[in-house]
Image: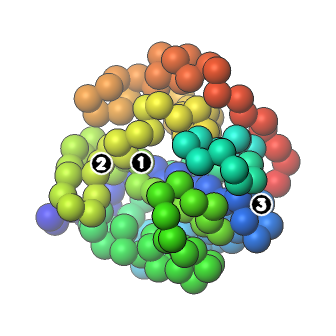
């Protein structure tokens, strides 16, 4: 897949090892990726865990980047950042030092064994949609449309905007 200078949105989340620091550090790491420029970063949001509830709350954010990396190369770079910050993949929905997910990459709709774009659960998560609408209020999700109605459907998911 050959793509040049793609506009991508990345979800950031952490609930271990000083989560605010982990997310802030990840913003810095995104800026250092080859051929990549961090365009915007959302505020930080605190959210309760989904799925596995016996863990600390998360700190979440979204970054908008412009990158020369193809989606699969971007995914590899994000996994390397997670690993550098101590991410262990012990079980599904386990607590984590850092989670980085490609939400959107241009208007691409893509799926292989390791990557799905748009992110398959982003439309059901206020902790993704709220920071996304903050930095990209006119954002359209391929196959779903504008994010505002999707965020409204997540109104029962509580978020707390924090300083960070």
Q: Which mark is residue 103?
A: 1
Is residue 5 shown left or right of residue 58?
left
| Residue designated by label 3 | 20
The residue lying furthest to the bottom in this view is 84
In percent of the image, x 46 and y 50: which residue is there? 9
Tell me if residue 48 can be seen.
Answer: yes
Instruction: Give the residue displayed 24% in from the left and 46% down from the top.
Output: 108
Residue topped by disc 2: 117
Distance from disc 1 to disc 2, alpha carbons, whole Å, reads: 6 Å
Badge 1 or badge 2: first in the primary sequence? 1
Q: Secondary structure at mark 3?
A: helix
As drawn, 24 above or below 135: below
The percent coordinates of residue 55 (x first, y second) are 71, 54
Q: Could you say whether the residue bearing mark 1 is in a helix, strand or loop?
A: strand
Q: Nearer the viewer, residue 23 or 112?
A: 112
Tell me which residue sits at (75%, 62%) in the image: 19
Q: Position of residue 61 (x, y in %)?
A: 63, 49
Is 43 left or right of 122, judged from the image as shown?
Answer: right
Quadrant of the drawing holding the C terminus: bottom right
Give the camera-side residue of 14 and 11: 14
Residue 42 visible? The answer is no
Image: 63 above or below 49: below
């Amino acid at each position: 897949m050959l793509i040049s200078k793609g506009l991508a949105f990345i979800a950031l989340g952490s609930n271990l090892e000083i989560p605010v620091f982990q997310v802030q550090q990840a913003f810095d790491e995104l800026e250092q990726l080859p051929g990549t420029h961090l365009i915007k970063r959302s505020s930080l949001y605190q959210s309760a865990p989904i799925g596995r509830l016996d863990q600390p709350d998360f700190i979440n954010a979204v970054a908008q980047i412009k990158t020369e990396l193809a989606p699969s190369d971007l995914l590899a770079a994000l996994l390397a950042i997670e690993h550098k910050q101590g991410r262990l993949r012990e079980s599904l929905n386990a607590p984590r030092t850092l989670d980085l997910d490609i939400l959107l990459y241009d208007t691409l709709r893509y799926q292989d064994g390791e990557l799905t774009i748009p992110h398959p659960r982003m439309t059901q998560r206020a902790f993704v949609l709220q920071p996304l609408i903050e930095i990209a209020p006119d954002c359209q999700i391929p196959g779903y449309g504008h994010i505002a109605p999707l965020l409204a459907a997540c109104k029962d998911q509580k978020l707390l905007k924090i300083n960070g």
